[in-house]
Image (cartoon, rainbow, N blue to C red):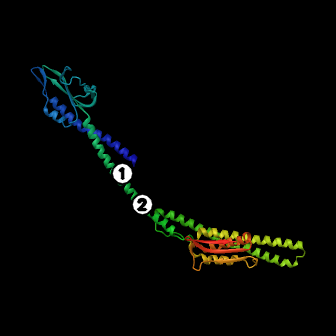
Amino acid sequence: MAAGAVILVTAAWYYARAAADDAYDQLLVGAVLQMTEGLAVEEGELTVSLPVSAFELLGLAGQDRIFYRVIDTAGRTLTGYDDLALPTEAGAAGDRPLVTGGRHGGEAVRMAVASRRLTDAAISGTARVVVAQTERARRDLARELTLWVVGLVAVMAAVAVTGTMLAIRYALRPVRGMGEALGRRDPQDLTPLSTDVPRELAPFVGSINHFMGRLDQRVGGLQRFIADAAHQIRTPLTALSAQIDLLEPAVSGDEGLRHLTRVQDRLRELARLTNQLLSHAMVTHRADVVQLTAVDLVDVTRRAFRSAIPITIDHDTLVSFDAPPRPVMVLGDPVSLREAVANCIDNALTHGVMSRLEVRVVVREGRAVIEGRG
């Protein structure tokens, strides 16, 4: 739009210059023709009577200076400015007035030359009249016309920009509505979009629906893999643990019992590590797809505490759970929170607790905190 505006303003400037030249050239030609009509032969001599109307006509350009020169048939100056040069094109102009540019007194002027052929017995030949006018009024008129065009271009540009902005906003309103619809969706909702959009956006919506369908298949496959992996891995480990426990009465000798104890420890460590990996995979998956809800942190922590304390815990280890009597509501995923708390308690019992484990839920400075102390 800026490039188009520059082209329009440039074209307007050249057109304004041409229009101003054409308008003032008509005045200049009218004045020089009136002066030519004032040429006459009286008593064998060429005389000139300059009409006042010719100067009044040129006076319409009040800012400009006027120069004139009347040349007789011998090329002598009859009246006017003797230093006003005759244009070189004047000889080939014929009977029609010649209008051309030039310079006089160090200033650019516009010149008009008219010829009159004399056929008197005393004087014969061609007399010429030259009228020159400075170009100030022409430049002012061209500047005024150009400024009008610039104003019109500016107004049209403002209207075009405003209209374009409104049109773009109106055209992209369905896209914004589609984005808001996607933002309001539940992360687990991968059903196709049913938003009404213009037919130009139908391929875009179709691509999104196709992508969501593929994503739904991948998410479902991942969930099935996690469930199958949990079942397929935990079942052999449980069976292997039972088989090792059955072998314990058949093992004799200190060396055999020591090796059996090591196998049982490694098996429990493997089962614990497997459960933690599966729990981590589940929590990571739910963090991306599950929408957070208000849950009671006390109830979640109590359930995690009960599931994480093994039945075979050492009787010398004292465990306790303390929580406020009222529910402590937080925004979160109850399954992920329970798995995280249970994992922390399991790690504490395995690696950090010597003889005591305290699990507490407290509210401190407006924040709900789960604390564990050994």
Q: Nearer the viewer, residue 313 or 257?
A: 313
Mark 2: which amino acid? Answer: Arg
Q: Is residue 297 left or right of residue 100?
A: right
Mark 1: which amino acid? Answer: Ala
Please, what secondary structure does the residue beneath circle 1 have?
A: helix
x and y percentages locating residue 220 in the rendered image: 62, 71
Labels 1 and 2: the sequence-earlier one: 1
**Mark 2: few, some, or many residues within 10 Å (few <14, many ≥20)?**
few
x and y percentages locating residue 127 in the rendered image: 18, 24
Furthest residue toward left:
43
Quadrant housing the C terminus:
bottom right
Residue at image x 39%, y 47%?
A: 2
Give the residue pinned by disc 1: 157
Residue at image x 69%, y 76%?
A: 308
x and y percentages locating residue 69 in the rendered image: 20, 26
Give the residue pinned by disc 2: 169
Please, what secondary structure does the residue beneath circle 2 have?
A: helix
Q: Is residue 72 something one can see in this rendering?
A: no
In this view, 241 is above or below 1: below
Residue at image x 28%, y 40%?
A: 142
Q: Quadrant of residue 37?
A: top left
- State how far apart marks 1 and 2 are (Cα): 18 Å
In this view, 290 is above or below 49: below
Q: Is residue 93 left or right of residue 335?
A: left
Q: Nearer the viewer, residue 239 or 296?
A: 296
Residue at image x 66%, y 72%?
A: 372
